[in-house]
Amino acid sequence: MPLSLADIEAVARGAHAAQTDKAGRPYAEHLQAVAHGVAARGGDEDQIAAAWLHDAIEDEALTEDWLAEAPLTARTKDIVLALTKRPGEAPEAYAARILATPGAVLVKQSDLAHNANPARLAVLDEFTRARLTHKYAHMRNLLGLPDEPATEEVRDERDG
């Protein structure tokens, strides 16, 4: 039987407990925002579960072996693996894998929307802010995603 969303959230929070984002905030805040964004965009339980775990392997918070053995649906595992960037991987190859994996685009859309949130970017230095803004816009373009209105993400941020 697959883990419940509450169990997956607890695993993700525990795995990332020592991590902070680029602004020094607890990393779990990002995971929560992405999971909430997936739900708000109509995502299903597999996608919400993947949202909680989307950076776990890439950030070495959990291992691929853990993911392979974890009581998760195959679809959740596929989405997490699709969203895991590989060292030296070209953005085009990363985007192609996401596009080829059912359910992954919605999770990446929520991730990009939170990452590009003007309130989050505002606390970074100008060079980093410009670099990340370009990076996120490029990935949205590769995935065929429209720009999202900043007001939506600011509202999501306040809601938790």
Image (cartoon, rainbow, N blue to C red):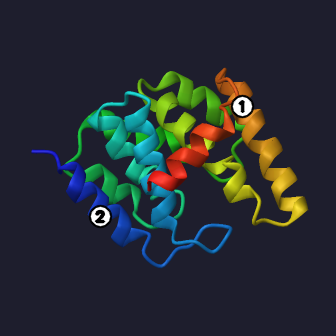
Q: Which structural element holds mark 1?
A: helix
Residue 71 x/y as whole percent:
19, 50
Q: Residue furthest right?
A: 127
Q: Which residue is mark 2?
A: 11
Q: Is residue 118 left or right of residue 15?
A: right
- Given the image, on which type of amino acid does mark 2 rest? Val
- The relative height of residue 129 versus residue 36 in the rendered view (above or below) is below
In which quadrant is the C terminus drawn?
A: bottom left
The first of marks 1 and 2 along the sequence is 2
In the foreground, 30 or 59: 30
Q: Residues within 10 Å of mark 1 (few under 14, many from 20)?
A: few
- Given the image, on which type of amino acid does mark 1 rest? Glu
Q: Is residue 7 in view from this perspective?
A: yes
In the foreground, 110 or 70: 110
- The relative height of residue 156 versus residue 38 in the rendered view (above or below) is below
Residue 80 picture quarter:
top left
CA gap between label 1 and label 2 equals: 30 Å
Residue appearing at x 23%, y 38% in the figure? 73
Residue 129 picture quarter:
bottom right
Q: Which structural element holds mark 2?
A: helix
**Disc assigned to residue 107:** none
Which numbered disc, 1 or 2, marks the residue closer to the eye?
2
Residue appearing at x 38%, y 44% in the figure? 50
Q: Is residue 10 left or right of residue 128?
A: left
- The relative height of residue 61 versus residue 7 in the rendered view (above or below) is below
- The relative height of residue 42 versus residue 13 in the rendered view (above or below) is above
**Disc assigned to residue 92:** 1
Residue appearing at x 52%, y 42% in the figure? 83
Residue 113 x/y as whole percent:
61, 41
